[in-house]
Amino acid sequence: MIVEWGHFALTIAFVLALVQSVLPLWGAARNRADWMAVAVPAAWGQGLFLVLAYGVLTYAFIVHDFSVLYVAQNSNSTLPLIYRITGVWGGHEGSILLWALILAGWTVAVAAGARSLPTVYAARVIGVMGLISVGFLAFTIFTSNPFERVFPVPADGADLNPLLQDPGMVIHPPMLYMGYVGFSVAFALAVAALLGGRLDATWARWSRPWTTAAWMFLTIGIALGSHWAYYELGWGGWWFWDPVENASFMPWLTGTALIHSLAVTEKRDGFKAWSVLLALTTFSLSLLGTFLVRSGVLTSVHAFATDPGRGLFILTFLTLVVGGSLVLYAWRAPRVRALIHFAPLSREALLLANNVLLVVAAAAVLLGTLYPLAVDALGLGKLSVGPPYFNTVFVPLMLPLVVFMGLGPLIAWRQGKAADLPRLVWRIGLPALIGAVVCLAILGLGWRRYVLGISLWLAFWTLGLSAYGIVQRLGRRGYTLRAWRQLPRGFYGMHLAHAGIALFMIGAGVVSTLEAERVVRLAPGEATELAGYSFRLDAVYPVTGPNYTADEALIVVSRQGREVARLRPQKRLYTVRQQMMTQTAFDAGMMRDLFAALGDRLPDGAWSVRVHYKPMVRWIWLGTALMALGGLLAVTDRRYRLDAVRARRSGVAQVQPA
Amino acid sequence: MKTARKNRLLLILTVVVGVGLAAFLVSLAFRENLTFFFTPTQVAAGEVRPGQPFRVGGVVIPGSVERQPDGVTVRFRLTDTRAEVPVQYTGVLPDLFKEGQGIVARGTLDGAGLFVADQVLAKHDENYMPPEVADALKAQGAMPDHEMLRKARP
């Protein structure tokens, strides 16, 4: 019975989403305050019923209710509790339900702060988010109902895909979805502003923290996904330019551009139409990502067997969202164009360059991801675009971006001082270059490793400029603790995120230049050498987990005769699906990871073993963590908190006719 | 005013040149890195030059997997039911690699018609067949029954 309640709650949520979109939007058009007033309670109601529906599905997983088809397909009586809870989003139906739940969460968050928005604007924003909810809930109910029953009831479930039975999988999808879906707020704010025909300060001021918040979650989500792929897929790489990775990376690129373009919009009242276009693009790319992953059109490690009917639904939805918002843009945007003046050396110019580079990079990734699909759809053959394409295009685009990124915060708005540029190049650029050359010399690397040299140089350049910028700004107030604390959090957030990029570049540069890998045949007792480390296979013995059996190897790693790590990689057989899984083992460190994966057992009792040496690979995720932390600081900046407090104190919403 | 206009022109020129350069880079890299997909039938018909990187997909013929003496090199044969391609791969095969399973391999043909793979992809989901493989099999009118293939294993 409880399962039917879940289905019922889902249906009510769908009806409430309809109410939440139609009435407020209509009310805003007709200036009917009573209809607009429906927006906030409808949003809360929709959220509440989705929590209920989601809770019921989770309950069905926990109590092993295999009469529910989705549970039977994605769980098993031996599945540990934690994976029964996370298994809710381990398959298609549950993922989409989670998507809808998170969307409702963002809507409620907007609704909670809506009092500080003009009534008409708030009604439109919540209404637009309601429309997106309608699309996703219709998708869930009509094509991907997670509450569908199965008869006869199977005795046991088919188990969760072993790849997803991993702690990384527990938090990666929710974070990614928080990011994807979070951009719906920026989208709704932009569409509502276009509907109202004015892109005013309220729109820009509101868009900034919401965009940054979504970006922060997306950054965490992508980083977790990269880390998960690193150890779970067992290939030892951290980024594969896989279509599904690209799907999450494209909104990240345009979202990053949006954050910076909104800075110009808020501070200088410029780049308005451009910011709106970026907001529309970013969310459209998020939807495209969902479509690519969920429709099964991709050949990718992430591609699961799927139903083409679903793909068609999402494609239609995507077309409506992209087409509708672009038409609205074409109709309204010419009215709001504002030309601002700035010099070629000014913060605006640097931010413009940043935006152009990020958008071109996103377009190049889009081309590489969609081209094979387009060619296939046209029946012109089957092909794929390899990682070398992405590297060749992406890296040269990012290098000037990083040069500008460091400079931006130190160049004044409107008209930068001409003397600043040579001074910064001499004081920061030259020492950074010397530092990079010294590093290469210490590592004993020649000129042919110039890629590493350039990434180190740019990383030092960025770190140096950030430090310089902070010191310079403090200097105006005196170097006291009080002055330190008085600087806005957003300022530190920006520098922290930029420093994160620098650490990321150091990690990526070092690991791609100096990593080593070897596949060998090892009998117990034998050892292999890699990058000065000796990996000795001590023994292989059977172990048993809750829902798998495995062969576990003990690999002792030593350096110059001294033991440094014990690795225990496993080759698991998940008994329900009879599926093999390689469980890699790694010893993590700031300066290097040692990584081992067990291959196949050979007839003579030896094993094929793959070992990796990954210097400074952790810096990649450390850098992304700093970026996310920078985002967090920016979102919690005092001026946004003050806004919220002021709104609560004033209590009365301002009414502003559209 | 004149300098302002000049500045704007300069800016627009910079953006145009920058985007043009990027487009040039993209098209250059793009053409060099397209990897085409061929079926075993096409490979057998000599449609691919040795040394040209491409992808081939098909079903691993049950019983064809042979491990070489070094312990880490594997040879097997791929089929779309009409023609076969011998494949060699050095490294750890993906977990879902099985005889009778549809896979996609990337690599080049050597002079003797052996496909030397640098990557072998099998999928997350064991009932999933890479679309290219499914289409290649359908084109031959022979979408295999998985159960049958599994039973056919020695």
Image (cartoon, rainbow, N blue to C red):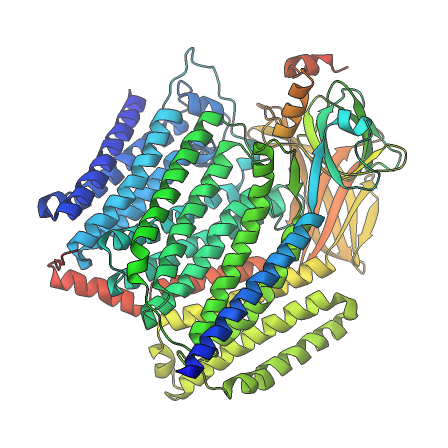
Instruction: Indicate the position of residue B12 as horizontal and vertical percent values.
Output: 49, 69
Looking at the image, which residue is at 73% across and 68% down?
Answer: A450
The quarter of the rendered structure image containing the N terminus of chain A is top left
Q: Is residue A346 found left or right of A393 in the rendered image?
A: left
- The vertical placement of B152 against A74, above or below, is above
Q: Quadrant of residue A391?
A: bottom right
Q: Quadrant of residue A92?
A: top left
User: Which one is in front, A492 or A395?
Assistant: A395
Instruction: Indicate the position of residue A120 as horizontal and vertical percent values.
Output: 17, 52
- The vertical placement of B97 against B100, above or below, is below
Q: Is residue A445 at least partly visible in the picture?
A: no
Q: Quadrant of residue A546?
A: top right
Looking at the image, which residue is at 50% across and 51% down?
Answer: A250
Q: Is residue A214 found left or right of A616 in the rendered image?
A: left
Q: Is residue A121 found left or right of A503 in the rendered image?
A: left
In the image as oriented, which residue stretches furthest toward the top?
A: A152
User: Which one is in front, A394 or A603?
Assistant: A394
Instruction: Indicate the position of residue B81 as horizontal and vertical percent values.
Output: 74, 18
- The vertical placement of A108 against A83, above or below, is below
Q: Is residue A564 at least partly visible in the picture?
A: yes
User: Which one is in front, A184 or A120?
Assistant: A120
